[in-house]
Amino acid sequence: MFRMVMATNNENKINEIKNHFWKYEVQILSLKEVQIESNPEESGTSFQENAFLKAKAVAQKTSLPVLSDDSGLIIDGLNGFPGIYSSRFMNGFSYEEKCLALWEKMKNVENKKASFQCVLCLLNFQKDPLYFQGIHKGEVVYPKGKNGFGYDPIFYSYELKKTFGEATAEEKNAFSHRGRALQALENYLLECHFSAK
């Protein structure tokens, strides 16, 4: 059994990753399951830097491989905002309130194009971290749908022709930014570390 610690307290992200690897002899462990407390300051200036900071903080406390994720919504018409601040924007408010607040900012902005971006950082197999990136393009719309989490209801996917909030978990995971980063990670792990059940 291949075991890997996920450097996040976000249960939604953990579930997406577990669902991606269900067909393999792999166990994704949460910080709670390995009794690690970690809330590193996300002081990086990019998704990659923040993913590394999160992975490094956990890798110092375990001998297991560590996987971290940093991701966010990049809105062209707002000069890339919220970007790396996606989770920290309106901290303390619900994502329903955050989505509505972003839509208010966008109402009079002509360019509503946006992308979800994800960077995964894998530590412990080698001296240097490995990175896996995924991007999904679309645009910002008025919130639609109750599925998913975070900014999913305001992100209209050009490929799915619906918001992530309207998509099923299977649809989203197959096409999303995190799904694509996970596919790149899966390809690497298949070559080096585990096989299907």
Image (cartoon, rainbow, N blue to C red):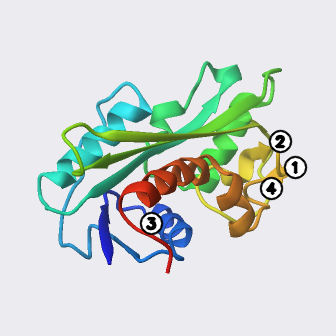
Q: Position of residue 128 (x, y in %)?
A: 24, 36
**Residue ID at (54%, 65%):** 16
165 over 73 or under it: above or below: below
Looking at the picture, tell me which residue is in the foreground, 188 or 176.
188
Q: Position of residue 60 (x, y in %)?
A: 12, 52
Question: Does 172 sit left or right of 15 as displayed?
Answer: right
Label placed on residue 161: 1
Residue placed under numbered mark 3 in the picture: 14
Type of the residue with mark 3 = Ile
Residue placed under numbered mark 2 in the picture: 158
How far apart are the two marked residues, 1 and 4, measured between alpha carbons? 12 Å
Between discs 2 and 3, the one toward the N terminus:
3
Q: Residues within 10 Å of mark 1 (few under 14, many from 20)?
A: few
The mark closer to the camera, 4 or 3, is 3
Looking at the picture, tell me which residue is in the foreground, 40 or 49.
49
Q: Residues within 10 Å of mark 4 (few under 14, many from 20)?
A: some
Residue placed under numbered mark 4 in the picture: 144
12 over 132 or under it: above or below: below
> Is the Cβ of the residue at disc 1 closer than 8 Å to that at disc 4?
no
Label placed on residue 88: none
Type of the residue with mark 4 = Lys
The quarter of the picture where residue 67 lies is: bottom left
45 over 41 or under it: above or below: above
Looking at the picture, tell me which residue is in the foreground, 24 or 48.
24
**Residue ID at (77%, 51%):** 143
Type of the residue with mark 1 = Lys
